[in-house]
Structure formats: structure tokens, C-alpha cells
Amino acid sequence: MANLKEIRNRISSVSSTMQITSAMKMVSAAKLKKAQDAITAMRPYSDKLTELLQSLSATLEGDSGSKFATQRDVNKVLIVAITSNRGLCGAFNSNIVKEVTRLTNDVYANKEVSYIAIGKKANDAFKRSEKIIANNSDVFDDLTFDNVAEIAQDLMDKFVSGEYDKIELVYNRFKNAATQIVMTEQFLPIVPVEAEAEASANLDYVFEPSKLEIVEQLIPKSLKTQLYKAIRDSFASEHGARMTAMHKATDNATELRDQLKLTYNKARQAAITNEILEIVGGAEALNN
């Protein structure tokens, strides 16, 4: 039977851990509400803007206005891996690392692949590969559209200049607090609109100013919004994953503490019984 002092120390340690995980769960729950409201309000606008711009840019094929939709032979690929700056959120970060690794080894096995990290965990995972060209983890210190827009503009410049033929975003899409969906989303070139959607969108619109001017102004804004939405999705997913992970950790710590208390009580009872037996045995020896 374990020493009583050792068991007491373990109970104290587990209780402290339980208090920490419980506090982290409550903090993540509070942050999740705000992050969830932000992405829920933004998603319809972003999706509709992307759909409109895809349809509009398809009508300008071959024009200078469709430079972001130019399809080239894919030789150089840039993957933007969006993770968190902190851990303790279950498989949230490892799922992104696994998906980026799968894309590199399977989908783009014969291509030249580079990475941009948004989140310290992505930077830590890929910094040894010498394929990482930038680390924008500080964007989470002040997550605003303007800060994300600078990253998106850099990505657009790299694509237009021909430095990369394709740019992919890999991030966690927020579904609910317990579920995050790993997404691989093509950022550039712009994904051509589906044939059926294009036909339904081919209505007799009057454009003012011209289609070309609208595309030149709105496509960069749409791409910046797309990246901002992906980072916002990841941000909300992070807090949901951490809240769930800390909830499970708290439950496990509670169960372990209860088991240790039971073990402690059994050990204490056994020690008392032994003392009683020793006293009785000593009394009997004196009487004899």
C-alpha cells in the first residue's frame, strides 16, 4: 500500500491541476462566444462576395482584369498553414500539421512547396524543413481586418508576379464548440464558378462602372475577406477546441482525485487497523 504522505501529495497536485483546467475552460468559453458571433456574422457576407466575384471574373477570361484567375501549370505551391499560438487545445494544431504534410507528400509530391505560418504552432512544426518563408503569428495579437489585409496583399503580389502558381489555405472551420473541420481552400488562382451556377448568374445586369473596374476593385477586397474569414474561423475553432479539451481534462482530474481519495481512505483504514492490532497484541503479551 502506498505511503499516506505520497497519496496526499498526489491528491493536492491533481486538485491544483483540476482548478487550472477548470479556469482555462471558463476563459475559453467566454472568448468563444465573442469569436463565434464574429465568424457567424461574417460568413454569409464573405460567401456571397466570393460567389459574386467568381461569377463576374469568369466573364472576363483572358482580360487583364482576371489576373487573379489566371490558371498556370502548377510547379510552385504556397501553403498557408493557420494554427494557434498556444497549445492545450487537443488535436486542433496537429490536425493542420497532418493535413499540410499530406498535401506536401501526396497531392504536390513532385512540386516545389513552401509554407507561410499563421500561428506559432505551425511555425514550430515546419521551421526545420527550410520550406517556411514567413511567420505571421503576431497577427493574433491584434486580429483586425487591416492586419490580415497586409498578409493577403503579400500573397496576391506573390501570385501575380509568378513567384507561385497556386496558393492554398489550410485551417480549421468552426462548426460548434466540439467540432472543427479541417479545410483546404484554394486562395489563388480564383476557383472558376461552377457551370450551373454561372448559367443561373448569367442575367442581364447593367454594370456601373464597367465589369472590369468592378473586378479590379472588388477581387482584392474579396481575397482579403476570404483570408480574414479563414483566420477568424480558426480563431473561433481554437477556443472551442480548448474549451472541450479543458472540460475533458477537468473531468479526468476529478475522476483521478476521487480514486486517489478512495485509495487514501483505504490506506488510512489499513494503517489504523494495524495500529489497533499492535496495541492488542502488546496488551496480550503483557497479560501473559
Image (cartoon, rainbow, N blue to C red):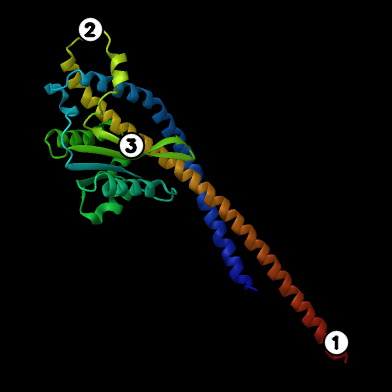
Circle 2 residue: 206
Mark in the foreground, 1 or 2:
2
Name the residue rendered at 26%, 48% in the picture.
104
> Where does residue 280 sit, x and y in percent of width and height?
82, 82
- Where residue 156 sits, quadrant-wise, is top left
Q: Amino acid at mark 1?
A: Glu
Nearer-the-camera pick, 24 or 127: 127
Tell me which numbered mark, 1 or 3, is placed earlier along the sequence: 3
- Side (left or right) of 159 relative to 128: left
Nearer-the-camera pick, 119 or 63: 63
The Cα–Cα distance between marks 2 and 3, rounded to whole angstroms, is: 35 Å
The Cα–Cα distance between marks 1 and 3, rounded to whole angstroms, is: 78 Å
**Disc ID at residue 231:** 3
**Disc ID at residue 284:** 1
The Cα–Cα distance between marks 1 and 2, rounded to whole angstroms, is: 110 Å
> Where does residue 59 sit, x and y in percent of width and height?
20, 18
Q: Is residue 5 visible?
A: yes
Determine whether 67 is above or below 10 in the image.
above
Helix, strand or loop at label 2? It is: loop
Check if mark 2's residue and mark 3's residue have beta carbons within 8 Å: no
Q: Amino acid at mark 3?
A: Ile
Tell me which numbered mark, 1 or 2, is placed earlier along the sequence: 2
State which quarter of the image contains the N terminus: bottom right
Q: Is residue 134 visible?
A: no
Determine whether 224 is above or below 208 in the image.
below
Q: Amino acid at mark 2?
A: Val
- Side (left or right) of 148 relative to 237: left
Helix, strand or loop at label 1? It is: helix
Helix, strand or loop at label 3? It is: helix
> Where does residue 193 sit, x and y in percent of width and height?
27, 23
Residue farthest to the bottom?
288
